[in-house]
Amino acid sequence: MGCGQSTPVSQVKDRPLPAEGNENGIAKHTQNANKEVLKKVAIAGFDNIIHVITDIKDLLPPPGGPAAAVLLDVVSIIQKAIAHRKNLADLAERAANLMKIIQLNQEALQAKNSYKSVLSSFTDCLERIRQYALEYSGSGWLMRLWCCLSDSEEYDSLVSELQTIVADATFMAAADGSSQAAAARREIEELAALVKAQASYQDESGELRALVAELGGPGEVVKDRAKMERVRQQLGAGSQLTLTMLGQAIEILNANNEEGPHSNIRNSILRVFWRKVIRFELRIPWGEFWQVFPERLADVPVPPAQVAQLQSLLGSTSAHQLFKLQIEDFEDPGSLSVFELRRVPEQNDIVVCVKKIIEEASSSSSAPCQLPPLDKVYEQYGGRGPEAQELQQWLSKPGSRVAAVVAEGGMGKTCLAVDVAWRLWRGSHATAGVLYVDCRGAFSRDALLLKLRAAAGVTSSQGDTEALAAALAKLCDGDPAGGRLLVLVDNAEDPAAADGGEALAEVLAALLMCHSRVQLLLTSRGEVRVQHMPPPHTHRIQPLGPGTAAELVLRLAQGVLTGQEAGGVAEACGCVPLALRLVSEALVAGRLTLEDVQQAVAERAAAGGDGSSSSDPTLMFVEMVLRSLHAGVKKVALQVAAFTGSFTAASACSLLGGDSASLHEVRAQLTSLHRYSVLLQHGDDSFAMHMHVRGAARALLQQEAPAQLQRGVRERFARYVAALLARWQRLHADGALKLMVAEVAENWADVEQFLADVAGGEEEGAAGARPLLPGSSPLALSPQLLRETQLLATLSHGDFLYAVGKTWMSPTYLALTQRLVEVTQAPLQQAEAGGREPEREERLAAAAALLVRCEALMYG
């Protein structure tokens, strides 16, 4: 809906985009070009795909370009794949033929208002294929081949999805015989037959496992070049797979299958290096590390040419210092641990990886800058340049200390504040550094301090505000330029919620008093106070201007909406950025039409603004967009709404009940939700959901999801949090306090969500967290859950809880300990009773001790 010449909203049809300067439709020369290309793109297998896509992509009306770009990326990834190439090439060929069908049949699809929805479904499927192909082009390709037993099922599922889309793409042409010439119809039918051809999966995985088992297993194969050559020939990857690469893949497989200190390292090459060279140590002196790195990378094995390149890159003391600067823990600068090496990302080429680390260290200031990249995380931000300049100028004045950006949710407070902070950093005003503190879910003074300490690199064992103040003062005093240290406190309304802002006001005052060059920039939905100080300079932002809002819609729906239509959408959304993004993406995907938007506005006007969520245009459109999502993606969105803060694809996979083999599938779904603006993406593997979107998704989960799904989400979330607690306890035991505090600060909101779920009910807990499903019964903690997650054992480490801080001292934690006693005191099931009574008594004693300690902390 809504591409082409300007017309009244009620008369808009989904139609081809006119050529530039031609108001009457597609120019005749474009139609002729169409025909020539269609004659030229004969089916010639995988090698011809790039040629086919390149010829077609400019002939697809918007939003065809993004779909073609994803397919080109898919082809590029498949060309680099080490295994499974025949199956992947078959998927790419079917997808290319489907794209040609959509291009041939575009007029009929547009006449039936289904072009955009078909293209959106196709793009989602392409993203699934892209993530699937990445599994066989990365360092873990052998792990996938060796361990995944559902490969054929996933291949069949992708083929089936393409066949479903091709049925949608050709159905309208069949129903409208006059829309296509006979020759074009025959071509569509021929192409459709190729897409619908029976799937013919080639089981490389089963053949590989059988051969490796015959040769004595991975450990024996890696020792014998003749055996490795047989495996290489079996895979059929030709010269693309060398014996060194195969040996490296087998060592990665072995390292992944064996638990040890190396398991904490993300980068596969460094994980194998630590396992084979350093072995069982968690931490070694830097001097010992440089004695074996990079020379002993040959043991991984890394090709000799790459080892030589690394020796050249790291051949000087200055290069050592730059590498160390990027990844070391300054609390123990004399040694290197596996936890610090977690900062080295996963990347196939270790030379590229190390080179990037050194380049970043060379170009970066010694002062920290923690700001998210505005152009990537908030890529649709715009229209607030004058406001950003005004705030920048105010904060640049001598004596300016605190500014607050205040507005209701969805207005773009975070975007504006991040923009201002970047201007101050790049303008050499905040030369002492910029700290970014996201307070989502920090519903107490202690949780706020936890996040501030993590941003400043301070472990919680160093005290309350004293160590934090000392760290900030050190950053200021260490700046030779004598500039400001800017602390951006985002979503300050959450820590202010529990006690009317008293604790927040106290902490902000303490930050300002630690040094005269500390500046604060806050975002909040309400007014902010600073204890014993004048009110902050408050900048209240309003919806975008009509012209600016219409420009944003046009940018989001490029080629899909006309200027007049974009203006109508902007007006309907109240010019609120969040609503503009969500509605524009839904219009582009064909999940909403302009008539849908018009009808929603009319119904809201008829209701007269009764104070319900449906009377707020932003909340109304958020719910409307969530309801419009396709069933599978919608189900994912409702479940990941359980996360209060940011989360990774692996976290989402745990919540959705998946395993490591389905992680790429989850990534594809999250990428689609990001494309729809339902999720924000912070970095390569960190996602977040806006407060309004999360609230609407949770409401739909409670209102519409089956009871089994609701129960499953709550139980899986409990298991996820229990796993987090267990990991933090291990980090504490291993002395990785800085990493522990950083992870606790980032994920503490999820722990509070879990505690609130255990307490149940309608009311907020003392920390401000609400149950995932308000009014639901308290979360059941079964004996099985306790046994599998070892929650009691984790919580029995009192020193760990004290290291986390006073955040545990809340009524919700008391409810958890009471529930643990109830569960462990209950009679064991008959099937478990035999010989397990001592274990039950031991668990009961531990639970009782937890309860006593919690009551002493709270009431002592």
Image: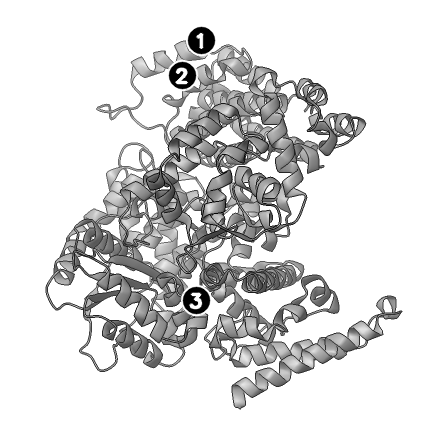
Determine the residue positioned at 64% across, 47% down.
659
- Give the secondary structure at mark 3: loop
Numbered mark located on residue 564 in the image: none
Task: Determine crowd level at label 3: few under 14, some 14-19, many 20+ residues with C-alpha closer than 10 A.
Answer: many
Q: Determine which quarter of the picture holds residue 387.
A: bottom left
Q: Mark 3 — residue?
A: 459
In the rendered image, residue 685, in percent from the top left (x then y), is placed at: 47, 46
The amino acid sitting under disc 3 is: Thr
Give the camera-side residue of 705 and 258: 258
SS type, badge 1: helix
Mark 1–mark 2 Cα distance, whole angstroms, equals 9 Å
Percent x, y of residue 172: 52, 28
Q: With 379 as the anchor, is 687 left or right in this view?
A: right
> What sort of colour scheme is used for the picture?
one colour
Q: Note whether residue 301 is visible.
A: yes
Camera-near label (2 vs 3) is: 3
Most extreme residue toward the left, as rendered? 398
